[in-house]
């Protein structure tokens, strides 16, 4: 079942092409990585896929419906930023309740949902903590929990491990596929790290200056214990 369909997408700024041509589909439960060096059009693509910017050409279809603009509050979309963007004056639980409040998730299920997702991300003990008391890795776990919590059609992740130190990034990377399997989340993961793409993704899309290339990822990643 196709969740996200990107058809003949092109973005240019005046005469400057940022994305030449991009076509891909993401099925429910898939983990797709979009890989490319800086300047290859990653930000432009994130802006289009999150409904912040109209493409110059092409279409973005989510669950069979065209993504109309501006759709930055489209409930079908979850977003994990490079840095967490949690509200500092709200506890972890309150940060999660804000997105639940904007969703149609029934209030009597919030408590159980929050407990479950915090458990899956191994941050249950921080439910009543202030974000600034958490480590960078813990904060990014909360921000992933926040995106998964309302069960969006798909989740866009913009280099979510890139601001973390090596050890923290590695442990979250090692858990991320398991988290997605347990929650059934569909992920589009944007990164410049080949390691992350190969380790995490079912499929890797490489953005280049010409048409983007799509690769099935058959490599079984091995990490040293
Ligand atoms: P990335 O995020 O991979 O670095 P961008 O989407 O930011 O890529 O940029 C792709 C290309 O489009 C680059 O050549 C960049 O200079 C150009 N570009 C990005 N934003 C603008 C803009 N607002 N006006 C003109 N050119 C832009
Ligand atoms: P890079 O992306 O720079 O190749 P690595 O993920 O290989 O970074 O990590 C850098 C260091 O951590 C290396 O010294 C490597 O040997 C070590 N390392 C890599 N994976 C693990 C792991 N799962 N457990 C412990 N150390 C590791």
Image (spheres, grey):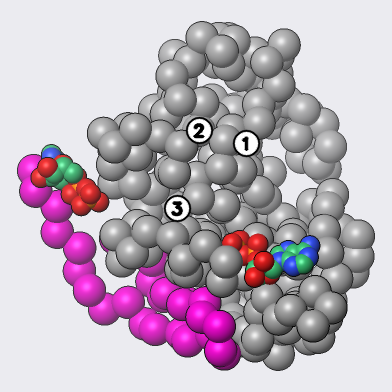
Callout 2 secondary element: helix
Residue that extends furthest to the left in the rendered view of this protein? 225
Q: Quadrant of residue 101?
A: top right
Please state which of residues 33 and 165 is positioned toward the viewer in this rendering. Answer: 165
Gap in angstroms between the C-alphas marked 2 and 3: 15 Å
x then y, percent, for residue 83: 57, 36
Of circles 2 and 3, the one toward us is: 2
Q: Magenta residues?
A: 199-225
Task: Using a 10 Å C-alpha cutoff, classify the residue at mark 3 as few (fewer than 14 neighbours), some (14 to 19) or many (20 or more).
Answer: some
x then y, percent, for residue 162: 44, 44
Which one is earlier in the sequence, the residue at label 2 or at label 3? 2
Quadrant including the N terminus: bottom right
Q: Main secondary structure of the magenta part?
A: loop
Residue under pointer 2: 140
Residue at the spot 62% in from the left edge and 36% down from the top edge: 146
x then y, percent, for residue 76: 75, 57
Gap in angstroms between the C-alphas marked 2 and 1: 10 Å
> Looking at the image, how many numbered discs can be counted on the residues?
3
Residue 99 shown left or right of residue 141 in the figure: right
Residue at the spot 83% in from the left edge and 53% down from the top edge: 72
Callout 1 secondary element: helix
* Residue 218 colored in magenta in the image: yes
Task: Using a 10 Å C-alpha cutoff, classify the residue at mark 1 as few (fewer than 14 neighbours), some (14 to 19) or many (20 or more).
Answer: many
* Residue 207 colored in magenta in the image: yes
Of circles 2 and 1, the one toward us is: 2
Q: Are marks 2 and 3 in contact (CB under 8 Å)?
A: no
Quadrant including the C terminus: top left
Residue under pointer 3: 180
Residue under pointer 1: 146
Q: Which quadrant does ligand 1 occupy?
A: bottom right
Gap in angstroms between the C-alphas marked 3 and 1: 13 Å
Tell me: is circle 3 under 8 Å from ligand 2: no
């Amino acid at each position: 079942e196709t969740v996200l369909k990107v058809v003949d997408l092109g973005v240019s700024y005046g005469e400057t092409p940022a994305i030449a041509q991009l076509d891909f589909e993401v099925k429910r439960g898939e983990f797709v990585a979009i890989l490319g060096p800086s300047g290859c059009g990653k930000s432009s693509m994130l802006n289009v896929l999150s409904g912040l910017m109209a493409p110059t050409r092409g279409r973005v279809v989510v669950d069979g419906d065209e993504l109309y603009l501006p759709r930055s509050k489209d409930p079908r979309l979850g977003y994990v930023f490079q840095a967490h963007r949690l509200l500092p004056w709200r506890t972890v639980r309150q940060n999660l309740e804000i997105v639940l409040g904007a969703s149609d998730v029934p209030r009597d299920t919030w408590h159980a949902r929050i407990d479950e997702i915090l458990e899956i991300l191994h941050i249950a003990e921080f439910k009543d903590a202030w974000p600034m008391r958490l480590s960078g890795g813990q904060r990014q776990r909360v921000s992933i929990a926040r995106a998964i919590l309302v069960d969006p059609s798909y989740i866009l992740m913009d280099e979510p491990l890139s601001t973390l130190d090596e050890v923290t990034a590695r442990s979250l990377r090692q858990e991320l596929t398991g988290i997605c399997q347990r929650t059934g989340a569909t992920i589009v993961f944007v990164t410049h790290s080949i390691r992350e793409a190969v380790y995490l993704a079912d499929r890797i899309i490489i953005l280049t200056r010409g048409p983007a290339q799509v690769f099935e990822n058959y490599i079984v990643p091995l990490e040293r214990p």
